[in-house]
Image: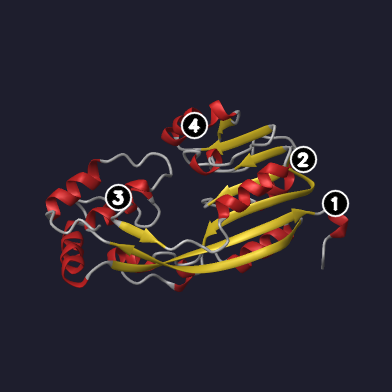
Amino acid sequence: MPRTHRTFEELIAEAAAVSVDGWDFSWLDGRATEERPSWGYARAMAERMSRASAALDIQTGGGEVLASVPRLPPLTVATESWPPNIARATALLHPLGAVVVADPDEPPLPFADGAFDLVVSRHPVKAWWDEIARVLRPGGTYFSQEVGPASVFELVEYFLGPQPPAARSVRDPERAGRDAQAAGLDVVDLRTASLRTEFHDIGAVVYFLRKVIWMVPGFTVEHYRDRLIALHRRIETEGPFVATTTRFLIEAVKRSSRGSEKA
């Protein structure tokens, strides 16, 4: 249940002190809700993992999603750039037989051409399509759930003001499909979802913005204190702050040869 009887200072202090390492949002249970896409990424990814012989999870975060797979391929590798997440993912995934590689999330990926028959990524910061295609074997699959355009922008614009059209068009799924095609991958599935998200107290907002650092770059409680106080009062009087989360699912298969590219 929402924690309605705690003061602004108590909520802020708690949310500012809790660790934001990893990519586990369970701290928000009872404080925020996010509708889930109908396609069930983790389940669908696990199904593909069960059929793969060599798999790569790009930008694994703390390794939580990969660790949920019941049966990992004989060769399973994950990459991550943020040191606290590297340590967390290593502790979680090594006992399961998966290798974690520190990688700056920029080209090139530290793997040979055609090393994997499955590459996955949940919420990558950026998909480097040429590198994804390079490390996939011909006929191999890329499977990813990505953040869509203008996701949670109601919250972003509350703190930063109206955003330009260019900011709203970033992470466009149709552009992702075109970029995948240009890199030598045939898109076999592309789906989008707009999902309701609710923040039930100001602590949930602070935690979310501390964890998802690109939403409000440079966010600190001190800098946005006045806006936070105003939002706290609004939530207390009007109910949860509602935003729209956007997601898209993309699945693409590497062509057998560059010569088979479509016009």
Instruction: Identify the residue shown where x is 60% and y is 28%.
Output: 97
Mark 4 or mark 2: name the one nearer the start of the chain: 4
Quickly name the residue at label 4: 92
In this rendering, the label closer to the viewer, 4 or 3: 4
The residues bearing labels 1 and 3 have C-alpha atoms spaced at a distance of 45 Å
In this rendering, the label closer to the viewer, 3 or 2: 3
Residue type at the position of mark 3: Tyr
Mark 2 or mark 1: name the one nearer the start of the chain: 2
Asked which secondary structure carries label 1, the reply is loop
Mark 1 or mark 3: name the one nearer the start of the chain: 3
Q: Seen in the image, is 157 located left or right of residue 2?
A: right
Quickly name the residue at label 1: 256
Mark 1 or mark 4: name the one nearer the start of the chain: 4
For mark 2, does the 10 Å Cα neighbourhood hold few (<14), some (14 to 19), or many (20 or more) residues?
some
Disc assigned to residue 207: 3
Where residue 59 sits, quadrant-wise, is top right
Q: Tell me the quadrant of the picture where the C terminus can be found.
A: bottom right
Mark 4 or mark 3: name the one nearer the start of the chain: 4
Where residue 31 sits, quadrant-wise, is bottom left
The residues bearing labels 3 and 2 have C-alpha atoms spaced at a distance of 40 Å
Asked which secondary structure carries label 2, the reply is loop
Q: Position of residue 236 (x, y in %)?
A: 17, 66
The residues bearing labels 1 and 4 have C-alpha atoms spaced at a distance of 35 Å
Mark 3 or mark 2: name the one nearer the start of the chain: 2
Q: Tell me the quadrant of the picture where the N terminus can be found.
A: bottom left
